[in-house]
Image (cartoon, grey):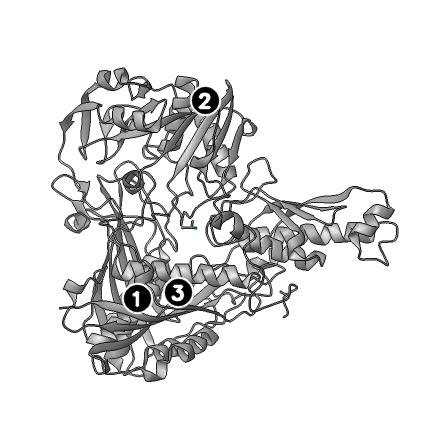
Amino acid sequence: MESKIKVKDPELGPSRVDGRLKVTGAAKYSAEYSVKGVTYGVLVGSTIAKGSITSLDTRAAERAPGVLAVITYQNCPEIPGYHTPDQPAKGPLKIFLDNKIYFNGQPIALVVAETFERALYAASLVKAQYSKDGHQTDLKNNLPNGIAKGKDYVRGQEDAYKSAPVKVEQEYLLPTEVHNPMELHAIIARWDADDKLTIWDKTQGVKSTQRNIASAFKIPNDNVQVNAPFVGGAFGAALRTWPHEIAAVAAAKLVKRPVKLLLSRADMFTSVGYRPQTWQKIGIGATTDGKLVGITHEATGQTSVYEDFTEGVVNISQLMYASPNVNTKYKLVSLNVNTPTPMRGPGEATGAWALESALDELSYALNIDPIELRLRNHADTDPLSGKPYSSKFLKEAYQLGADRIGWSERRQQPGTLVKDGWLVGYGMGAGMFGAYRSNATVTARLQVDGTLVLQTAVTDIGPGTGTAMAAIGAEVMGVPVEKVKIFLGDSSLPPSPTQGGSQVTSTVGAAVYDACSELKAKFKALEGGATSNDYVQLLTANKLPQLEVTTVSKSGAEMGNYAAYSWSVHFIQVLVNPVTGVVRVNKAVSVADAGHIVSPKTAASQIKGGAIMGIGMALMEEALIDHRYGRLVNNNFGDYHVPVQADIPQVEALFVNKPDPYLNPMGAKGMGEIATIGVAPAVVNAIYNATGKRIRELPVTPDKLI
Ligand code: MOS
């Protein structure tokens, strides 16, 4: 089936509609707004990991120049949402509720002053005494304390891999990774009346933030105006409303002035979640001709003591391949750490690291090419539900990527390809993520000056949502993309979902499609509309300044008949220095089956960004705790490593670019998550191919290779 959308220049598509604003600095991020009378907040964190505050000395801070208030559990204004009946035993951290300490770095005070510098200085004067309890921050030591979460999954026979003629049974460890978007989390909170509030906030969802703040302060949703027109990356870290946001709103109430709270980079490690450290064990077995007999996948992730965070780590093993026998188990260990949160490809990225590594190990045990092994176990229908796929072009993706990376140069025997003194290796890993569509409302307006205005509340955290909206709107209406104006990131606009879960182009794009189709029909119905497509002329002839529709767009019921996923495969060529253990990623090719690509430039950028994130996951990222104190030791960009330009080769993004016939009118599927899922194992598999050394604990730093 054809997509109902055709992009004029399929190679490129439109440039970012907000690109100029971003590169010239004209785009304003939350902390950059000037609000009259604004004050500045700085958080003070606990220096113990478990216990309680026995005394808090805030006098010196309060007397410091320019200080307006030091907010602690002793004087924090009542947050009514903390005291609603039927509070669950576990839940989000209730900031400044009492003197209990659950993790090192937990906010114990918020200093508010006339300037940022004065607040920062006064924060250094806050002194706390604690009664310490013994803390636990080490996942590895606490694995026996894992508590089962959700139901164990069994398809066919449990642990069937054990009876297979060829089998692999291994453990894989992923350290904690922190989102660390470039833009720091920030909020400006201003009370406009006793029950009315405006905030400028870094958030992936203005509507969810509106609801969360309104329910915390028990005011009507419509009385909370949330602005987030630009978001400088988030990767999941801004999906929730965090304690520091509640604290800033409470502080603004106390000092009766607007409060700006910009987290420090160190705060970012303890205030806005992370991808949790996770232990996994995979047992996988096959017949000698490479047909999977069974997969057993167990995982234990860490969470905080006050809240459970679960993710679908083991789900990928239930879904990815046509194995008759699969069983999975998932557990959590509660530690004295802050709560994790979804980070790009939540669950699946972690699960794929283990599954795609184990499959690679199996391919060597069988002496079968890793792509060939995957083809022999390709699932033609969804193994979990038995339903047909709405679309699946993973085989095409394998082929495209293998051709582009030069897979034919790969040697099946590890450690045998050497170039200029470097060991050369090729590796691959696949990924998948659910393809979703939810509800969104879009207002589309064509003005007499020829401008097409599209409005919806959704935020654009960087993938190019606004650009995709413009591409779709321009195509449906038949106007140049330069004539499209996008308004988003504002809670007063028509409702849209939170940007997350790889569903926004599918959802909001479909709403743009529907709204523009309706607008077009409205023009057709005008006097003369049947014979003319010239909107400006029609408006003028009908003496109208503009024509506007607001359209609610929903997924069709037929989606229930299909299993819908996006698919990806990542190919990596590495060079490994046999003396120093240094790994250089020399070439990276990622291929996505993300349906029809509506905005090729931003889509390619999204895929490349995800691949770079996966390379960081494989080689660099690792948040380290000194367990003696339960405190992070590398909570800064000097010590927590992420890839920089010099670490990254030319990353190529390729698309199968075939429409999904059912998900939405554009035929587009999501790609935010699959961009990262499967990359890290591809790197590790390439390192094995280069060196014959199998690393099962990320990141693969040089010391692990020599
Ligand atoms: Mo994403 S982890 O759905 O923001």
**Residue located beneath label 1 in the image:** 681
Name the front one of labels 2 and 1: 2
Residues 101 and 460: in front is 460
Any mark on residue 37, and which?
A: 2
Q: Earlier in the sequence, mark 2 or mark 3?
A: 2
Is residue 357 something that shows in the picture?
no
Q: Indicate yes or no: mark 1 CB to ligand 1 under 8 Å.
A: no
Disc 2 from disc 3: Cα separation: 49 Å
Image side of residue 425 versus residue 464, left or right: left
Q: Nearer the viewer, residue 669 or 623?
A: 623
User: Mark 1 vs mark 3: which is more N-terminal?
Assistant: 3
Task: Tell me whether the residue at label 1 lies in contact with that at label 3, contact meaning CB atoms closer than 8 angstroms.
Answer: no
Q: Position of residue 168 (x, y in %)?
A: 23, 71
Report which residue position mark 3 lands on: 431
Q: Which of marks 2 and 1 is nearer the N terminus?
A: 2
Residue 276 vs 57, above or below: the answer is below
Report x, y in % for residue 201.
45, 36
Residue 100 sits in quarter: top left
Q: Check disc 3: other Cα within 10 Å, few if <14, some if 14-19, many if 20+.
A: many
Q: In what element is the residue under mark 2? A: loop
**Camera sees residue 519:** yes
Tell me the amino acid under the disc marked 2.
Gly
